[in-house]
Amino acid sequence: MPHESLNRSRYWDGDYYNEGMDAATFDKLKEECGVFGVYGHPEASALSFFGLHALQHRGEESAGICTTDGKEFYYHRDMGLVKEVFDNDRLISLKGSTAIGHVRYSTSGESQLQNAQPLVFKYRGGDMAIATNGNLVNAAEIRRELEEQGSIFQTTSDTEVVIHLIARSQQEDIVEAVKEALRRLVGGFAFLILVNDQLFVAQDPHGLRPLVIGKLGDAYVFASETCAFETVGATYLRDIAPGELLIVNQDGMREDRFAPMQRRAICAMEYIYFSRPDSDLDNINLHSARKRMGQKLAMEAFVDADVVTGVPDSSISAAIGYAEQTGIPYELGLIKNRYTGRTFIQPSQELRERGVKMKLSAVRKVVEGKRVVMIDDSIVRGTTSLRIVNMLREAGAKEVHVRITSPPYMNPCFYGIDTPSRNNLIAASKSVEEIRQAINADSLHFLSKDGLLEAIGRPQGEHNRGMCTGCFDADYPTEVNDEDGSCGC
C-alpha cells in the first residue's frame, strides 16, 4: 500500500511524546514529578543530570536544569527524557556550582514546553528559579487573586503562583518573603527555590511529598528519593521535616521553619508503587516494605496455586514476599519489554490491545496449565488488570487469582498524583466481587488498610502511622475543594 494512502488520523504529529500508547493502553497512576538540587559542587550540572536520570520514573515528559555561578542563571528545559534533553555540550554550558533540576509528568499544567521546570523568572531582586513536586490545593484561588491585582502569568502551571507571591511580597528580606509565600499554600509540595546566591528547600507542613538531603564532599544535595544519592555517590543525611525551610548559601546551611509541623501524612502510594525499590523513605527500604506487603497479603488471602508472578516492575518485591510466605514458587510469568521506544502512531483500539503485548508479555512455558497468583499494586480503572488477566489466560493459565497490595483505590489524589476523577475509579462504584468479574479473575483480594500500615512498618502513635491514605478512605490531611485531583508541577 502506498504511504500516501495510510489513514493519517492514526498518526500523531507531536514532536516529543508518544501520546496515547502509555496513557490509553495502561491505566497506571502517574507519579507527579521529581526534583534534584546541588549546592557547592563544581560539576553541579552533571550531578543534576545523573540525579534526574535516577528519578526518571517520577516524570517522563519533560526535564530541565537551572544553574548559577552566583551572578548569572544558565538553564535548559525541553520535552522528553533526561538523556534526550541533555548532552555533554549542553551540560558544559550550564555553568556554576549550584543547580536545581526537575522531571515532570503533566497533569494540572498542560504538556507544553512553557510548563517544563525549573520555571525561571526575573524579579526586582534578580533571578529566581523554582522546581516542585506535588500539588497546591488552593492554587486556583491564589491565581485569581493575583490576576485581579495585576499579575500576568506566563504558564498554566500552578507552581508559578509561588514565584508571584514571593515577587509581590513587601518583605525586604528574601528569606521572609519565601516564608510568607509558603504560608499561603495548602497542599502537598516539595520546593527547590534558587536565587542568585541562595538555595531554599521547603517541605509542606504535612510532609506529603518525599524530599531528602545528603552530602557529597562539602556540597549539599537534595532529591525526591535516596536512589539519586546512590547514583551520584552522595551520603544520605536525613529526610526534610514537614514545615521545614532550609537556607543554603556561602555561609553553609541554616535550618529554619516556615510553618509548624501538622499531622504527618506522607503519601502511602510512595511505599506501594511510586518510589524506586532501592530508595529508603523515612529510613524504610521500599523493597523490604513491599515484600512485607506481599507476605501480609498471603496471610489475609491465601489461595492454593502453582506459581506466583508479579506485574513488573513495582509488584515484583511483593510477589516475592507472597511466594515466600506461602511456599508457592515465584516465577517470571510476566516480562516487561524495556526497549519498545516511542512509536508515532495514535493507536486504534485494536492496536492499543496489541500495544499491551509490546510493553508486557506472558511467559507461556511458565503459566501454561498452571493456577497463577498475579500480584499487582493497585487497580485504577480496571482496564489494565483485565488485559493482563486475559493475556495470562491466552498463554494457557488454568486459573488467574489477582492479589492487590493496597486497599481499593476509591478517591482522587489532591496532592500531586495524576488520578482519574472518582467517576472513573472502578472501586468507587463497584464491589470487590463486581471488580473481580470486570477483570475476568477467578478470585480477587485487596490488602486491608490495617495490613498495609502494619506491613510498611512506620512507628505507631500517629494518625494512620503518619501516612496519607485519602485515596483509600477519603481521610485527607487538608481541606480539599475539587472533585479531580491534579498536579501543580
Image (tube, helix red, strand yellow):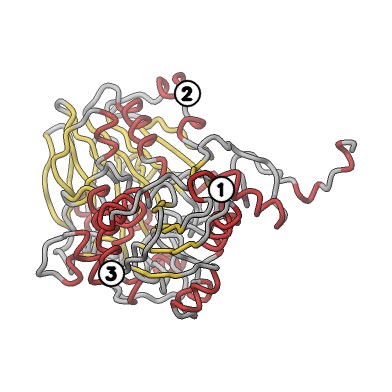
Secondary structure under tag 2 reads loop
Between circles 2 and 3, the one closer to the viewer is: 3
Q: Position of residue 286 (x, y in %)?
A: 26, 49
Residue at the disc numbered 1: 112
Q: Nearer the viewer, residue 184 or 242?
A: 242
Q: Position of residue 27 (x, y in %)?
A: 52, 59
- Specify the amino acid type for callout 3: Glu
The tag on residue 87 is 2
Q: Position of residue 407 (x, y in %)?
A: 34, 70
Secondary structure under tag 3 reads helix
Specify which label sits upstream in the sequence, 1 or 3: 1
Residue at the disc numbered 3: 300
Task: Please indicate whether residue 396 sits to the left or right of residue 288 in the image.
Answer: right
Q: Nearer the viewer, residue 421 or 311?
A: 311
Callout 2: few (<14), some (14-19), or many (20+) C-alpha neighbours within 10 Å?
few
- Specify the amino acid type for callout 1: Gln
Residue 181 in view here:
no
Specify which label sits upstream in the sequence, 1 or 2: 2
- Specify the amino acid type for callout 2: Asp
Give the Cα distance between marks 1 and 3. Answer: 45 Å
Secondary structure under tag 1 reads loop
Which residue lies at the image location 41% right of the left edge and 44% below the top edge?
57
